[in-house]
Structure formats: C-alpha cells, structure tokens
Amino acid sequence: MTTQEGYLQRSPHPSSLYDVLDLILDKGLVIDLYVRVSLVGIELLTIDARIVVASVDTYLRFAEAVNRLDLNETGGKDLTEFVSDLGQGGGRGKTKGALEGAKEGLKDVFSGGDDDDTEKASPRRRSGSGGERRSRGKDDDE
Amino acid sequence: MTAGSSDGAPSTATYVYGVVRASEAPKIDAAGVGRQAPVRSVTHGDLTAIVSDVDAGFVEAGREDLERHMAILEQAALSATVVPLRFGTVMPDDDAVTEDLLRARAADFDELFSALDGRVELSLSGTYEERIFGEVVAEQPEVAALRERVRGRDENATYYDRIRLGELFANAMAAKRERDTEQVLARLRPLADDVHVSDVAHERSVLSVSFLVHRDRLPEFDRAAEEVAAQNRTRIRFRYAGPLPPYDFVGGGNAGPWG
C-alpha cells in the first residue's frame, strides 16, 4: 500500500489470515510443558493449502490449466469462460459434472494461498464469512 | 511453582507473549488474549516478560486471540528486541513466569538477545501471476507439443498424455521456482543476518522467506526488496510484511538454545 514504486505489496503486518497463520503458528520459542492453548474454529489454511504436487490428480489439473491457456492472449483465458464454453459444446450431464469438478479443483490449485487475488482493491478484510469453519484443535504437546 | 498467583484469584493464569530486555520494556496499551485483560509485564533481573491474565481454563483460542497475540508482539517490537513465545503459552501464575522462564532461562535469553539485538524480521512471499503458465509453455517445447496433442481431444484417449503434460508442467514450475528463489536470495541474503526459507504452501507460490535484518539496514533492505519486485513485476506478485518480531529466529519447534 505504501510502497514508493508500487511493485511490492507492503504492509506492516501479515495481511491475510493465511499469512498470519503461516507466519505465527508453530513459530516462536517453546517453553517446555507450557504450551497449552490450542487454536480452534479456524480453518487451518497452512495445512489445507499444502497440496501434494506429485499426484496424478494434480498433474491432471495442471494439464487442464495448460490446456485452457490461450497463448495468443497475454494472459490465460478466464476459467469460468472456459468451463462455460465447453459446457455449451458438449452438453452431456456427466461431462458437465466432471468439468465442474475440474473447475473446483483448479480453483483450489490456482487461486493461491493469498486470498486477496480478487480483492486487492478492498482494504484488509476479516474472514468471518470465509468458507466452512471446522474446529480442528492442535495438540501442542511437543 | 505452587505459589498462588499475584492477584490471588485461583482461576487466573498468566499468558506469556514474549520476553524483552527490562531496559527496553515497552509500555503496551492493549487488551490481551482470552478474557482481554490489560497487557502488563513481569520483570526479573534484566528480563521482562510481556503477559496478561487469562482464565486458568483458557485452553481454546480463536482467530481474535491469534491476532491479539500478534498485535501485542508487533507493538513491543516497535521499540524493543522481542523474543516471541509460541502462541498459546500459558503459565500457572506470575511466579512461574519469574522462576521457570526468566530466572531459569536467563542465560539462554542472554544468548538469544545478543543474536537478535536491534534486529527485526521481514517476511517476503511471492506468488506467480497467471501468465507464468504461458511462460512455461513457451519455454518447454515438450509441454507445448503435448498440449497441442491433447487439446480438444477425448479425455479418455488422452489420459496418459495429460498426466505426462501435467507432470512436465509441474517439474518446469519447480525448476522455475528454484531459479526465482535463488535470484531473490542472491540479492537480499547479503543484507540479512539470517534467512529462513519456508516450504512454499502452494503450487503457484514462488517463495516464502523470512529475513533477520538489523534496523539500521532496513532502508537498504527495503530498496533491495523493491528492486527485486520491480524486476519481476510482470511475473511475480510479492508481499512484504514487517518489521515483525523475529518469529523465525528464536529456534521455534523443539530446537533452539534449550531444545
């Protein structure tokens, strides 16, 4: 925000929940026997976002992403566009379902850990509404 | 250890955020985690722990608590060298803080402070822009060829080709990530006293690095980080946070001076 040249997205502190978790959770000095409080009610993005790269599933999603690239344009074609294009072309219900699935997958893979991709303009947001909230406590019994 | 807590309430425990040198102990005007008691300090010798009261039964924290923990440490780091403690550290009472933390570990803290004095953490992470996919295809003839072969063809017929395409792509991304990370580190590492490279969390992530930097070098470091971001402006979006308490440089995990 306050950068001189604008190429560096600067903030005094981590600006997304993902960054907060990534930066703070499991960091800091551990005093034996005294770490007791566990974090609950927060999607543990740091863990969930770690996708295993070396899997057939991931490769197929990558292939999907590469295929949808329109190399004549500067950027890739928007995924939603791609999905609806294909949906119009071959309209079998089953295919559509698979494509929807792929879309979800791609969103997972390529939307980035940073959640401000599409919200750069808005100031820092608080999650509240962000996705499902699972309570997954961490056992800090190191 | 069995002594009663300072305010006499048996249901109260002491949450510890971090430790500073007593001579630098900052005045922190904030509400703490849990019951949001005011942040205060516990001093022994030349060490001060930044603490607040929590319910003795405070065992589950939420997002607000995490943010408070972070904000309090950041406020302390504005003027002092801080050794951040792991989120969620609760001790039975102030006496335990004095005895088990400040007194028992005084020598270890000394060592830590001499490594950290005057230094802060800067966190830099980068994410590839979407166009990176085109870059990979352009650079990798085999990827481009496979792409042509599977495009518009039946999914089942191209199953193995698509796997191969994805694999090649993944490998190309990994190599690209490595090169880009090296390039960034080559520029910034010389300005830092220590560097901590985290595993990247995401396939489109380039890097996630923490630097331990002396305050005197912050302007220079900022300029270098700007430079790196400018060089990669069309390909990588960088996020830069700090100055922060040196979360990554106090031995985290089970390691550290007393691990």
Image (cartoon, coloured by chain):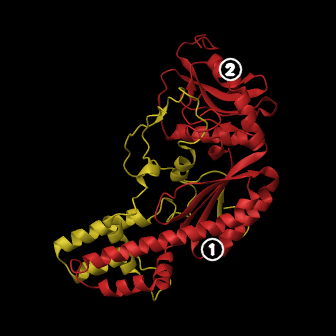
* Residue B195 x/y as whole percent: 66, 54
Q: Do discs 2 and 1 belong to a common subunit?
A: yes
* Residue B185 x/y as whole percent: 66, 63
Palette colour of chain A: yellow
The disc numbered 1 marks a residue on which chain? Answer: B
Q: Which mark is residue A26?
A: none
Q: Residue at x 53, y 39 (%)?
A: B64
Which residue type carries mark 1?
A: Asn
Q: Find residue B116 and report its image quarter.
A: top right
**Residue B38 in sight in this render:** no
Q: Residue at x 48, y 71 (%)?
A: B173
Residue, disc 2: B98
Q: Is A55 in front, or is A20?
A: A55
Q: Is residue A77 left or right of residue A83?
A: right
Mark 2 surroundings: few (<14), some (14-19) or many (≥20) residues within 10 A:
many
**Residue B40 in sight in this render:** yes
Which residue type carries mark 2?
A: Thr
- Compared with residue B245, is residue B88 higher up or lower down, i.e. above or below? above
Q: Secondary structure at mark 2?
A: helix
* Residue B23 x/y as whole percent: 82, 31
Q: Residue at x 69, y 28 (%)?
A: B49
Among the chains pictured, the one given red colouring is: B
Residue, disc 1: B232
The disc numbered 2 marks a residue on which chain? Answer: B
